[in-house]
């Protein structure tokens, strides 16, 4: 229990710092924020804006005001389109989450059996081929893979759409619509996961308790999945959590290329159209999401490994 | 995926499927000229080099030797638990009259757990850290016997109480790290005996434990063995452990049995100088405090390039020219069931003469030395875990 | 898992329990002897292993790409901005233009080599900045510990809690065109600085972790005991040992930065839309890929990026393995 409280306090501190940095984003811009935000506005509009975002007040007060708004779900308003940033993000965020989820599940679905099998048959021809393939995948940037997949599966064989379709029908339509971007994102993750799991699994398979399980007369399949997988999956779990961050970066460019109206594309548009309030909101949401995911991974970690759970409880 | 991975369903054991039982008077286990070697970068390591013995039902064989003498490899060879890769194995192993020396893993799987089982050295590393105790016990019950989960749980409970674990209900729901070392070893014994094996291997079952609980665990093993009429192979580096518990003792050195005898015969009429040295290194209560304990100088032979002749000759106080060139065969002694490998056996005129000769020449005065030991035990003669590094303190 | 230290048991008691105590040197001959054989029987690793074919291919490719990037102005290739209307969207094998042309008639081969010049410059310089700042921070934090370390680690954690590419994009937009230390930031400098800053936290983390292990080694303690100055210990004793691990990481980092640069170019935040970079070539060829008209533009640039990244990864892996061997052989 104390462990969770300590973790929660840490979480709050990190969130405060992250939000402060996001807040400072506009203040870090060269020149007067009012001019940056409304490059072509009238002096009255700028004065109104200064009052709105409070740049005429001292910085801590501005931050407190902004943070209060954020906590009430008000991420600010864009001064060109007069749209609420929170409205835009509410539409964009689910798209990005779907993409991340699809990619992660795809990566894990392939990486776990492959990693287990490779470790089980370590050194065999099949293992070597798997390792080589995976090493190759590790060196293909996701956007390049997206181009390749788009060309072969979208342009030459019209299996999947070459660009994100605005409306999809049914479950299979959903799977089809997201497949190319999700697969390009998953490939790199898959490689990382498979290598991690394989290494840990090989170490686990040399443990005494595996020989013990064998001496109980269990089948290899049972030993691999019931006895060896869980103790081997801690690095995998950590990597899955951490990689969500990497995926957000990758998803960003994949979204832009594939025209998925998610956080990445929103962020991209915000930057290119100089909608700084929206940009700030996007950065805040992404960073907070990232921190929260890492927090969850940390907690999950102790659930998976009873040793850590009890050690922490005892501490 | 390979077919062995896919086979997943429960395997109910009916009478026909079971390993056929032999007449009860035949030996349970016969081992003949078993050799096991490991391919390493340095060459072939001959860990077990021609071991033969037989074991009756319900009897205990103590296998004693230094680490590296091949005793652990021997027990794992018999049980077929060694990896296939880089392991060379020869010789005949008969379990209940059936040759199992080159049986496939699938065949051995029918024996493992139900016919033979093993108690491993270190209960800390041999129990799966992420599975609850109950799960680890009833797993093999559910797998091998066609019983319901409830009944398996009941059996697990009964097993835990029979190995002397207090509050078994609570323990079933705990993880291995929540138990003490002695408790863990009890759990391990419960797992090993769960499906009623006929043969139990105990591979240094007490080495990783506190001295205070070692005797309890050994007693438990002995009780269970008698109760269930199991045969047991008790592997240890400590003659003291097998002294009162084994029916027969085999002393191993450099991968072979150098002396084999019924326990009382071995202690009173030992013939091999290595056995003698081992017996001398047991501290005795009768000795006054601060008595110097004998130790064996030198180090065990390199198993890649073993010495010619008798493998013990470089460290033997009785050594003669013949020992260095010609390896002694296993010779029969006077007592039935007693055999040894030595040209100049301890306690015979030849042996005494050889020792006298060496003493006179003086060149082996160092071969048997004594070292001071603080028998009060105050200066850290703490047992190290297993074969871990010896502490540098103490002398 | 931490094992409880075992308490010494009086010998008499241990005899009553039926077994001799063991472990302490001299009391029982067996474990000591066992130890000796265990060491002897352990497989011997030889630190020196020949480079495999993969490593050689990587080295040759990297040497070729670096060499041609450096020599681009004097190589007999088409000028970087020359356009040949006759080769627009022509595939590889066009006479006089080995890889054909891009969508506006640049010679693709020449464009790729000039692109290597920019991409490699960004990769090496950004990682250089990352190492200079991050490496130093990590080294000092790992060596001096204390409050300095706490502050550095906290800052690194915060920096790492922003997705790198998003941070790079923001930085590249905010830095562009500003005057820093009296220098007007060009597109190239902006991207280098942005990616260099992104590289700092990861490099600092590795440097710190590596320093932590090395600064507890005996020779460092010995140097300290001899009264060596901290600066001397850090740079003469610790740094040379930290470097091999860092070198391996540097290879990987250059690969990551090259990809990031391409990504920035593709989303229009690179060193400039008209400049020859691998990312720009891909970006310019995107349209021709989706129409299926001239996929070779994206494919050629992708292949070059892939080979470079793969070579750097492979080399990094090889260095790390060698380094590991040296570690485990002790």
Image (cartoon, coloured by chain):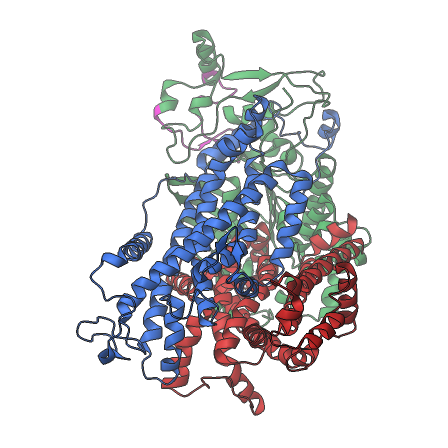
Chain colours: A red, B green, C blue
Q: Is residue B344 visible?
A: yes
Residue C275's place in the image compared with B340, above or below, is: below
Give C317 or C202, whichever is nearer the viewer.
Answer: C202
Q: For the stretch drawn in magenta, what is the main secondary structure?
A: loop
Residue B394's place in the image compared with B157, above or below, is: above
**Image point (57%, 55%), residue name:** A210
Percent of width and height locating residue C315: 38, 52
Q: Which residues are magenta?
A: B325-350
> Extreme front residue here?
A43
Is C127 inside the magenta-drawn segment? Answer: no
Give C58 or C105, whichever is nearer the viewer.
Answer: C105
Give B364 or B360, whichever is nearer the viewer.
Answer: B364
Residue C42's place in the image compared with B27, above or below, is: above
Left or right: where does residue C34 sit relative to residue A313?
A: left
> Extreme top residue here?
B360
Left or right: where does residue C34 sit relative to residue B143?
A: left
Percent of width and height locating residue C226: 56, 21
**Image point (59%, 77%), residue name:** A266
């Amino acid at each position: 229990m104390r462990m969770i409280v300590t973790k929660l306090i840490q979480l709050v501190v990190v969130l405060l710092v992250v939000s402060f940095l996001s807040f400072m984003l506009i203040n870090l811009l060269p020149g007067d924020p009012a001019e940056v935000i409304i490059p072509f506005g009238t002096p009255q509009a700028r004065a109104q804006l200064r009052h709105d975002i409070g740049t005429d007040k001292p910085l801590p007060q501005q931050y407190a005001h902004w943070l209060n708004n954020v906590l009430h779900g008000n991420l600010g308003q864009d001064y060109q389109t007069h749209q609420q940033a929170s409205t835009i993000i509410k539409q964009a965020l689910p798209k990005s989450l779907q993409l991340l989820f699809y990619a992660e599940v795809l990566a894990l679905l392939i990486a776990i059996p492959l990693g287990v099998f490779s470790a089980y048959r370590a050194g065999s021809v099949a293992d070597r081929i798997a390792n080589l393939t995976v090493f190759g995948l590790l060196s293909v940037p996701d956007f390049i893979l997206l181009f390749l997949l788009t060309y072969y599966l979208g342009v030459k064989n019209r299996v999947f759409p070459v660009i994100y379709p605005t409306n999809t029908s049914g479950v299979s339509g959903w799977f089809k619509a997201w497949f190319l971007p999700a697969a390009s994102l998953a490939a790199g993750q898959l490689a990382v996961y498979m290598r991690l799991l394989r290494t840990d699994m090989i170490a686990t398979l040399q443990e005494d308790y595996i020989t013990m399980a064998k001496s109980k007369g269990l089948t290899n399949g049972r030993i691999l999945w019931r006895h060896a997988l869980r103790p081997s999956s801690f690095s995998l779990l950590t990597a899955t959590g951490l990689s969500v961050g990497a995926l957000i970066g990758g998803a960003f460019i994949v979204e832009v290329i594939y025209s998925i109206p998610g956080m990445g594309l929103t962020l991209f548009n915000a930057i290119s159209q100089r909608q700084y309030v929206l940009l700030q909101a996007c950065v805040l949401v992404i960073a907070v999401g990232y921190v929260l995911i890492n927090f969850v991974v940390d907690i999950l970690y102790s659930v998976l490994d009873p040793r850590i759970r009890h050690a922490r409880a005892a501490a | 995926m390979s077919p062995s991975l896919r086979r997943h369903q429960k395997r109910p054991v009916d009478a026909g499927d079971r390993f056929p039982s032999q007449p009860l008077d035949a030996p349970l286990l016969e081992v003949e000229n078993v050799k096991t070697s490991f391919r390493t970068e340095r060459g072939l390591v001959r860990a077990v080099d021609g071991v033969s013995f037989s074991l009756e039902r319900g009897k205990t064989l103590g296998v004693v030797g230094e680490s590296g003498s091949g005793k652990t490899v021997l027990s794992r060879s018999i049980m077929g638990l060694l990896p296939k890769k880089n392991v060379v194995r020869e010789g005949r192993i008969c379990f209940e009259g059936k040759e199992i020396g080159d049986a496939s893993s699938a065949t051995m799987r029918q024996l493992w757990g139900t016919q033979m089982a093993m108690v491993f050295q270190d209960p800390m590393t041999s129990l799966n850290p992420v599975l609850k105790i109950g799960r680890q016990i009833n797993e093999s019950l559910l797998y091998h016997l066609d019983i319901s989960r409830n009944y398996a749980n009941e059996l697990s409970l009964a097993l835990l109480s029979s190995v002397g674990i207090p509050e078994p209900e609570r323990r079933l729901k705990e993880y291995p790290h929540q138990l003490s070392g002695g408790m863990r070893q009890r759990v391990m014994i419960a797992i090993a005996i769960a499906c009623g094996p006929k043969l139990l291997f105990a591979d240094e079952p007490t080495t990783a434990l506190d001295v205070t609980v070692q005797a309890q665990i050994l007693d438990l093993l002995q009780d269970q063995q008698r109760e269930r009429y199991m045969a047991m192979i008790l592997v240890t580096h400590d003659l003291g452990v097998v002294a009162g518990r084994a029916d027969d003792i085999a002393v191993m050195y450099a991968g072979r049995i150098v002396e084999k005898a019924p326990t009382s015969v071995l202690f009173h009429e030992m013939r091999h100088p290595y056995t003698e040295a081992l017996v001398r290194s047991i501290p005795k209560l009768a000795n006054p405090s601060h008595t110097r304990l004998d130790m064996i100088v030198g180090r065990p032979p390199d198993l890649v390039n073993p010495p010619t002749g008798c493998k013990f000759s470089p460290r033997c106080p009785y050594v003669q020219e013949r020992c260095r060139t010609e390896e002694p065969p296993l010779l029969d002694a006077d007592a039935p069931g007693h055999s040894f490998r030595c040209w100049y056996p301890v306690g015979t005129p030849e042996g005494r003469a050889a020792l006298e000769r060496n003493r006179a020449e003086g060149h082996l005065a160092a071969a048997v030395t004594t070292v001071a030991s603080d028998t009060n035990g105050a200066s850290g003669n703490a047992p190290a875990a297993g074969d871990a590094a010896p502490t540098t303190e103490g002398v | 898992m931490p094992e409880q230290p075992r308490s010494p048991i009086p010998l008499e008691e241990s005899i009553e329990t039926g077994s001799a105590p063991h472990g302490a040197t001299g009391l029982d001959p067996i474990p000591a002897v066992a130890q000796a054989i265990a060491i002897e029987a352990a497989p011997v690793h030889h630190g020196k292993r020949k480079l495999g074919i993969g490593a050689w291919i990587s080295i040759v490719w990297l040497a070729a790409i670096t060499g041609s990037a450096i020599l681009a102005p004097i190589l007999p290739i088409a000028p970087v901005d020359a356009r040949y209307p006759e080769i627009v969207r022509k595939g590889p094998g066009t006479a006089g233009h080995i890889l054909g042309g891009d969508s506006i008639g640049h010679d693709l081969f020449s464009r790729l080599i000039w692109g290597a010049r920019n991409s490699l410059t960004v990769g090496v310089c950004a990682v250089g900045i990352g190492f200079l700042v991050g490496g130093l921070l990590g080294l000092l934090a790992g060596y001096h510990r204390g409050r300095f370390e706490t502050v550095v680690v906290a800052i690194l954690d915060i920096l790492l809690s922003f997705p790198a590419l998003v941070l790079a994009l923001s930085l590249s937009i905010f830095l562009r065109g500003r005057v820093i230390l009296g220098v007007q930031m060009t597109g190239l400098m902006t991207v280098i600085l942005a990616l260099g800053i992104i590289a700092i936290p990861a490099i600092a983390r590795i440097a710190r972790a590596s320093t932590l292990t090395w600064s507890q080694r005996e020779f460092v303690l010995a140097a300290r005991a001899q009264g060596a100055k901290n600066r001397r210990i850090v740079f003469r004793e610790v740094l040379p040992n930290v470097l091999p691990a860092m070198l391996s990481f540097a290879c990987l980092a250059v690969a990551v930065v090259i990809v990031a640069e391409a990504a920035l170019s593709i989303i229009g935040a690179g060193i400039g839309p008209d400049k020859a970079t691998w990312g720009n070539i891909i970006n310019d060829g995107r349209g021709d890929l989706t129409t299926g008209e001239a996929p070779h533009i994206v494919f050629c640039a992708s292949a070059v990026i892939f080979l470079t990244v793969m070579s750097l990864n492979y080399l990094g892996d090889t260095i790390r393995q060698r380094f590991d061997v040296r570690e485990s052989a002790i």
